[in-house]
Image: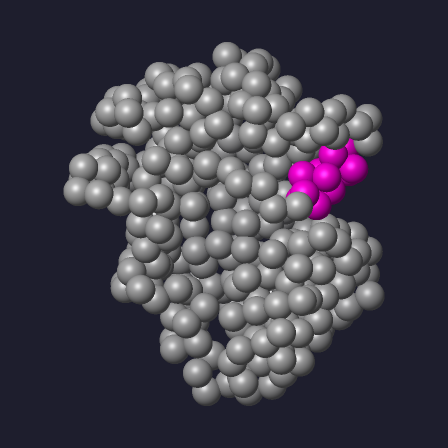
Amino acid sequence: MKIVTIDDFCDIYFKMKQKGFNFIFSKLNPIGKLRTKNTFNQNKIYASEWYIIPQIRERWNKLICGNKNVPYEDFLMQEIFAKKINLRLLSLGSGTCKRELKFASYPNFGEITCVDFAQTKLNEAKEIAKSENLNNIHFVCDDIYTYLQKQTDYFDVVLFNSSLHHFKNVNHFIQNQISGILKDEGYLIINEYVGKNRIQYPPGQIKAINQALQLIPDKYKKIYGTNITKKKFYGLGLLRMMIADPSECIDSINILPAIHNNFKTVIERPVGGNLLFCALKNISHNFVSLDTENEEILNTLFAFEDDYLKENPSDFIFGVYEKPQKSW
């Protein structure tokens, strides 16, 4: 575990160039919860993260659904929810609500509730729902723990899309709160980082990330908003992780054990990210528009990570789990 790394200082500089001084100053708030809230309440700011690459999203689709052109919402409608009606779905930490808005377009869902404490994101999603006449979805700006205290045995589906890794004491949270608001035989769906807490990678993984980085020619390693070439990944320092967002990956390593202890596994698909997540950080914009050369680079990176995953558990998982029926 590293307290501070070279990457920490570099990232502060890059964030300042990309997002401005106000974003950096917001991280100095002494109240950790407010620092977390500010992270997710930002207006749209372009960032060069791996998820902006279309081929990355197609890779996820292929690994989850078996078809690069099928997102997991459509896959779930075909495989799990096709014959179900009047479903009640709760999304916790919903952010932009992109997935939830897609679910709302299906008549199978009678009620979709999106809960987040980032009002800006919810307002944007609310406008989209209004423009598309989606009347079965509504948005709640609230602390999630406070909201859950008001619910019990009500929902058919609970969704965490890149949000469960922000919750502490995951086993207690899953066992005593999430299980309690789900009906018997209800579904828990996750699309999550489940790797090391605080993204504190072991030396072997950092070495493999740097090997992946060396597969990328320098002209495709220009860091977004700068003229600097990304040469090496040093790891993420614990201090910066806690300052930037105290909730980030706070108990991520216990997500899968907690779910497996309390739910029946229906679908569980590894989607990698062990190497690509950090190798492509801040340089992903170089792969948004493809030509023959950079598409081949991506394919090489995908193959390299696939080889790594043969010997190592995936850091990102898509899963569908069922709450067991009570036995009396």
The quadrant holding residue 38 is top right
Q: Magenta part of the protein: which range? A: 32-42
Residue under the image location 75 percent in, 70 percent down: 152
Residue at 39% of width from left, 37% of height from top?
285
On the image, the x and y values in percent for residue 15 come to 58, 26
The answer to whether residue 179 shows anywhere in this view is no
Report x, y in % for residue 126: 68, 66
Q: Is residue 287 visible?
A: yes
Q: Quadrant of the C terminus?
A: bottom right
User: In the rendered structure, does residue 305 fall within the stretch colored magenta?
Assistant: no
Name the magenta segment's main secondary structure.
helix
For the point 82% across and 26% down, the residue is 30
Q: Is residue 297 above or below residue 266?
A: above
Q: Position of residue 111 (x, y in %)?
A: 66, 78
* Left or right side of 174 for 269: left
- Looking at the image, which is closer to me, 233 or 284? 284
- Picture residue at 51% right of the left edge, 80% below the top: 106
Residue 202 falls left or right of residue 46: left
Q: Is residue 269 above or below residue 225?
A: below
Residue 92, picture quadrant: bottom right
Residue 40 within the magenta-colored segment of the rendering: yes
Q: Is residue 201 left or right of residue 57?
A: right
Identify the coloring. one colour
Q: Nearer the viewer, residue 152 or 50?
A: 50
Q: Is residue 224 above or below residue 59?
A: above
Residue 191 percent coordinates (x, y): 49, 54
Q: How many marks?
A: 0
Position of residue 101 in the picture relative to residue 34 (left or right): left
